Image (cartoon, rainbow, N blue to C red):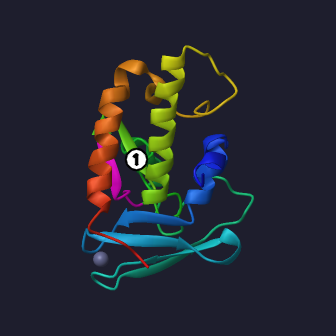
Amino acid sequence: MDSQPKRFRDYAAALSDFEREVWVQCPQCQQTALSRGLEQATSWRLTCTHCAYSKTASRRASQRKPMPWWRTDWWGEYRQRAGAVDPLFGLPLWLQTPCCGHVLWAYNPDHLDFLETYITATLRERQGGKGNHHGIAVRLPPWMKLAKHRPGLIKAVQKLRARSQPLRFS
Ligand SMILES: [Zn+2]
């Protein structure tokens, strides 16, 4: 029952919720690091438990896609990686994999659960033959809603889940 309310939420709104904990690749040791939102979600701290790398970044609430404070090529990186970078530090996401000519990415395992729910629920809706234009998955990228991509998407979700398994942050 816990996952029920999630199904009907706006994807863009949900995405900003998931920003509060983003798994990224550490710029120093290339292993998993964690970017966590601090109070009021106006500043974030990046910490790596493998090499003790640490940074803090902040942004004003009014800025939707700010430039991370020490990077000048953030948008270039964002485009090159098909959006699979974290929104504050511009670092590559840990949970990303090529999928159907695109990149499937998730900020964290909860986000991955959320995507999986959407992908499988859309499949159920289609099988039921109902066109629900106001329900779930409306805001997902169009390529993720194509029936021909579904087997690839499900495989990619499983791949990302395997990538997140050995790691748990407390
Ligand atoms: Zn590190």
Q: Quadrant of residue 82?
A: top left
On the picture, is 94 further left or further right than 75?
A: left
Extent of the magenta region: 91-97
On whether residue 161 falls in the magenta region, the answer is: no
Say above or below: 49 vs 69. below
Residue 69, percent across and down? 54, 68
Is residue 148 visible to us here?
A: yes
Query: Of all residues shown, which one is farthest toward the bottom?
Result: 52
Whether residue 65 can be seen here: no
Q: Position of residue 68 (x, y in %)?
A: 52, 64
Where residue 109 sits in the image (x, y, percent)?
42, 58
Question: Image height check: is 95 above or below 39?
Answer: above
Judging depth in this view, the residue of 85 and 134 nearest the camera is: 134
Image position of 110 with respect to 44: above or below: above
Name which residue lies at 71% across and 73% down.
40
Q: Residue at x 28, y 83 (%)?
A: 51
Furthest residue toward front: 1
Q: Is residue 96 magenta?
A: yes
Q: Name the residue that disc number 1 marks.
A: 105
Q: Which amino acid is tagged 1? A: Trp
> Which residue is pictured at 47% across the width and 70% down the height?
35
* Quarter of the image where one finds residue 130: top right
State yes or no: Cβ of the residue under disc 1 lies below 8 Å from any atom of ligand 1: no
Residue most toward the right?
Answer: 62
